[in-house]
Amino acid sequence: MILTRLVFECFEDTTLTAVERAISSLITELKYNGQIIGNEFPCLLKDGQFVTQALCPTEDALAHYNNNSAVSRALTALNEAGVLKPKIDILGQELHSDMSDPEHNPSWQILYTSYVQTCSPLRCGEHFAPIPLYRQPKLANGCYKQLINWQQDWQACDQLQMNGRSAEFAAVAEIGEHDSSLAMRGRALANTLEKNSGIATYYYLYRVGGENKSSEQQRRCPSCNGDWALSEPIHQVFDFKCDDCRLVSNLSWDYN
């Protein structure tokens, strides 16, 4: 990821409320278009300027050609609030996050995330690197709000099961069962991404537990009951892959 600073300047008299609302709206739309990553974007008022920092998938993430219609409207609303379009300062590579996949046409891709990751939930099947969402054909509503909301819900379940709290078993079911409410949402999104891009798009099923390693290795696809075990793991993560159901999974982390 690339750490970026956005600097907003007022060009006429306005109100703090109007400026705050306009900047917040722009940040929200940039997030839902995949141009900035994360959930918290502090904004600082300093020397008459409003300054915020964000992680971007690539150095050109905030370029105009990556904007969707909602981002363009938010930029117009900035002007109506008496604020200029933000000046973009590229601060450099953020060391604790993944670098985005090089721009190319992958043979397949995966809808995959975890609670520790701050990046796009779509990954290249060849490099396992995050793919910026704005490189994908636009969804019907012109943004990726549903996809990012799915990612946030998945990460919340992952955090719950890692913490081992009372909701652990329900959380594991949501991220590990192929027909859970969360999985059905994610699989529908993966199907839409595949239809729009023409690239085979798989959905990741988290796996933990099981009786023993031997029985785990003999697991069959939970959707079609087909043989989906791989002879060698992919990216040291996926031990199972069903091309018919577009599902991938790992050998239970208890025996990995």
Image (tube, rainbow, N blue to C red):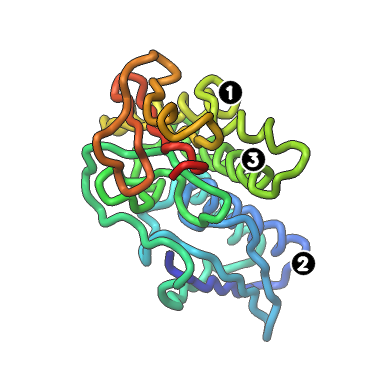
Dot 3 or dot 2: first in sequence order is 2
Label annotation for residue 157: 3
Q: Secondary structure at mark 3?
A: helix
Q: What amino acid type should be assigned to the residue bearing mark 2?
A: Thr
Q: Quadrant of residue 18?
A: bottom right
* Separation (CA) of disc 1 from disc 3: 12 Å
Q: What amino acid type should be assigned to the residue bearing mark 3?
A: Cys
Direction top: furthest residue: 224
**How far across and down, in percent of the image, does residue 190 sit?**
41, 30
Q: Secondary structure at mark 2?
A: loop
Task: Assess whether mark 2 and mark 1 are in contact (beta carbons under 8 angstroms).
Answer: no
Image quarter of the N terminus: bottom left
Q: Nearer the viewer, mark 3 or mark 2?
A: 3
Vertical comparison of 177 with 97: above or below: above
In this figure, which residue is indicated by the disc labeled 1?
180
* 47 lies left or right of 130: right
* 209 lies left or right of 235: right
Image quarter of the C terminus: top left
**How far across and down, in percent of the image, does residue 254 sit?**
52, 42
* Separation (CA) of disc 3 from disc 2: 40 Å
Which residue appears at 65% of the width and 42% of the height? Answer: 161
Q: Secondary structure at mark 1?
A: loop
Label annotation for residue 78: none
Circle 3 crowding by C-alpha within 10 Å: few under 14, some 14–19, many from 20: many
In this figure, which residue is indicated by the disc labeled 2?
15
Which residue appears at 39% of the width and 21% of the height? Answer: 221
**How far across and down, in percent of the image, does residue 31 sit?**
54, 52
Choose between 71 and 121: the one closer to the eye. 121
Q: Quadrant of residue 202?
A: top left
Q: What amino acid type should be assigned to the residue bearing mark 1?
A: Ser
Circle 2 crowding by C-alpha within 10 Å: few under 14, some 14–19, many from 20: few
Circle 1 crowding by C-alpha within 10 Å: few under 14, some 14–19, many from 20: few
